[in-house]
Amino acid sequence: MAKCSVANASIFIRRRFLPFSAVMCHSLPSTYSSPLSVAMTMTMTSSSIYCRPRFPISPLTRLPRFPNSSSSFTTIASSQASGDAGKGGEFPGRVGFLGLGIMGSPMALNLLKAGCDVTVWNRTKSKCNHLIDLGAKYEPSPAEVASSCDIDVACGTNGAVKGMGSGKGYVDVSTVDGATSKLISKHIRDTGASFLEAPVSGSKKPAEDGQLIFLTAGDASLYEIASPLLDIMGKSRFYLGEVGNGAAMKLVVNMIMGSMMASFSEGLLLSEKVGLDPNVLIEVISQGAISAPMFSVKGPSMVKATYPTAFPLKHQQKDLRLALGLAESVTQSIPVAAAANELYKVAKSYGLSDQDFSAVIEALRAKLQH
């Protein structure tokens, strides 16, 4: 059996499929009224990784430990050059991957390329076919994937939480607010398992290229075990201390990104309105202090009013909403982000939810026409 270049742990990755919907397709209210349901809540843009050692004695107690996650805020950063195929130690176990959407499919593919023994599941089985053709195994349910991947996950509507226990680890790559992440952590840790939140910065292309950025927080020993796995799917990783810090960092990053895109959209339309070529504006920006890959990559398509989805607009608006809640919780004013959030809400009302978040420019175009 091919061995995956990762640490001595097996992983089960669960994708989130619909905003605020449970892994077993049970819809939840946006207020997350059920704590247990909260622990199982997923969204389309992220995944959950479950790591279980293959040996009776858990490596969690044998690996060198980072500072305790309950200590004061700590940042440990690690970057890897792209294309580094020899990252980490060998991984002899199976990797289960549930959810093959925009992000999940390329992440699972990179695990396959690294030599991992991957078992996949998706609510729509046809989305698994290209990975099966490349050597992935398939199981007809999340519980069966978990079972076949040396992970003790009980069958039933409550999902994996009932199968967690001592010696296991849960690495959550979802984009949620800090309070939700802490609730998930509590339910996982109550079983005796370890928890690590690890939301990603990056969209479809970075996921395809293994260039994601992981923003992790939680049990430091699990970070040590999971790091080689994250290295397969990403270019860098940060350990940020207590659970909630990873979620907060992700929301701040996406708040900035959403605000930048709204301002960029205004600039493109204003340049066109005054008789300038917006494509020249993109070139000018690319050579100055405010140059950003996002502008160079998305700008030309925005000028043509085409928005191939890399990061859905509905998820950008959701992250802005969560960032506003985070700011309110610490009484920090963020008026620019608040204004941007309203613009994304208008774009959603125009039926652009599933378009790339750069389609927010259409909300401004519509305003110009009225």
Image: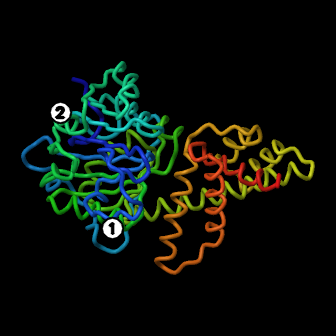
**Residue 42 visible in the shown view:** yes
Image-quadrant location for residue 134: top left
Answer left or right for 338 relative to 315. right
Q: Which residue is mark 1?
A: 242
In the image, residue 210 above or below residue 125: below
Residue located 48% across and 71% down the image: 326
Label 1 residue SS: loop
Answer left or right for 246 relative to 211. left
- Given the image, on which type of amino acid does mark 1 rest? Glu
Q: Callout 1: 10 Å neighbours few (<14), some, many (20+)?
A: many
Q: What percent of the width, then of the height, locates residue 170?
A: 25, 52
Residue located 20% across and 41% down the image: 8
In the image, residue 285 above or below residue 184: above
Label 2 residue SS: helix
Q: Mark 1 or mark 2, which is nearer to you?
A: 2
Mark closer to the chain start, 1 or 2: 2
Mark-to-mark CA distance, 1 and 2? 32 Å
Q: Which residue is mark 2?
A: 148
Q: What percent of the width, then of the height, locates residue 148?
A: 17, 33
Quadrant where the N terminus is found in the figure: top left
Answer left or right for 106 relative to 143. right
**Residue 78 visible in the shown view:** no
Q: Callout 2: 10 Å neighbours few (<14), some, many (20+)?
A: some
Towards the viewer: 128 or 91: 128
Q: Tally the marks.
A: 2
